[in-house]
Amino acid sequence: SGAGDEELAVEAVQGGAQDYLVKDYVNHHLLTRSLRYAIERKRSDEALRESEERLGLAMTAASEAIWEYRPSRGFVRWIKSNSGVPEAQPQSVSSPDLWDNRIHAEDRERIHLGFSAALEGQALSWSDEYRFRGANGEFTHINDRAEIVRDSSGKVTRVVGAMLDVTSLKHTEAALQESNRKLHQLSRDLLH
């Protein structure tokens, strides 16, 4: 900032600046400290970007979507990958109805009761399978798992979960059951 212009410096920090130096008070130590902090922030930002990239790649490889729920605000964050479930969720959306509106009507009450029971009890995790509407409007089968974070009094502070698209597994399971049914029928016919 300009010489003695502390008010401008405070406004800059409130507007998002990380640090400021006042010309009349700059010395070698302050300048060194400010540069060291800037370098550390850059390193931290790069490490965070790499971590987010790794998470995105892992989610894409696993066809998973990661979500976060806060009791006070509902679903506050959805991180998507490029296949399976994730295309159904916008990233970083805060909407209590986002999850609810996509659950198949026949599954909705069961899922709500199970999720609520886990939050109201002392559970540290929750999981279930249900049908979930994707971005294309079609329902997929989801295996949803979550870790429940509680404070020292046992109150839920947040829930972080992962949704895995198991539609192809469900189709394979149904085909196997049909094949077994036909095999049993063929066995009965042969015995007669």
Image: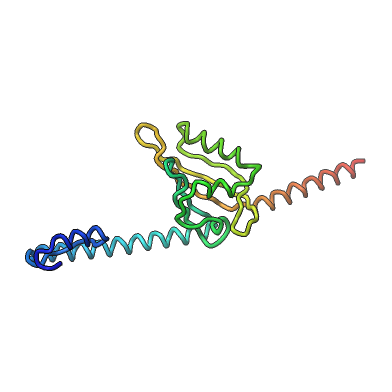
Q: Nearer the viewer, residue 170 or 153?
A: 153
Q: Nearer the viewer, residue 44 or 26?
A: 26
Q: Residue at x 52, y 33 (%)?
A: 117
Quadrant position of the N terminus in the picture: bottom left
Seen in the picture, residue 126 relative to 91 is either above or below; the reply is above
22 relative position to 106: left or right: left
Seen in the picture, residue 115 relative to 11 is either above or below; the reply is above
Q: Nearer the viewer, residue 157 or 101?
A: 101
Q: Residue at x 22, y 59 (%)?
A: 13
Q: Residue at x 27, y 65 (%)?
A: 42
The extreme right residue here reads 192
Q: Position of residue 136 (x, y in %)?
A: 62, 59
25 relative position to 10: left or right: left
Residue 127 figure quarter: top right
Quadrant position of the C terminus in the picture: top right
Q: Position of residue 21 (x, y in %)?
A: 14, 64
Q: Position of residue 147 (x, y in %)?
A: 46, 42
Residue 135 figure quarter: bottom right
92 relative position to 40: left or right: right
Q: Residue at x 45, y 32 (%)?
A: 122
Protein image colouring: rainbow
Q: Position of residue 32 (x, y in %)?
A: 13, 65
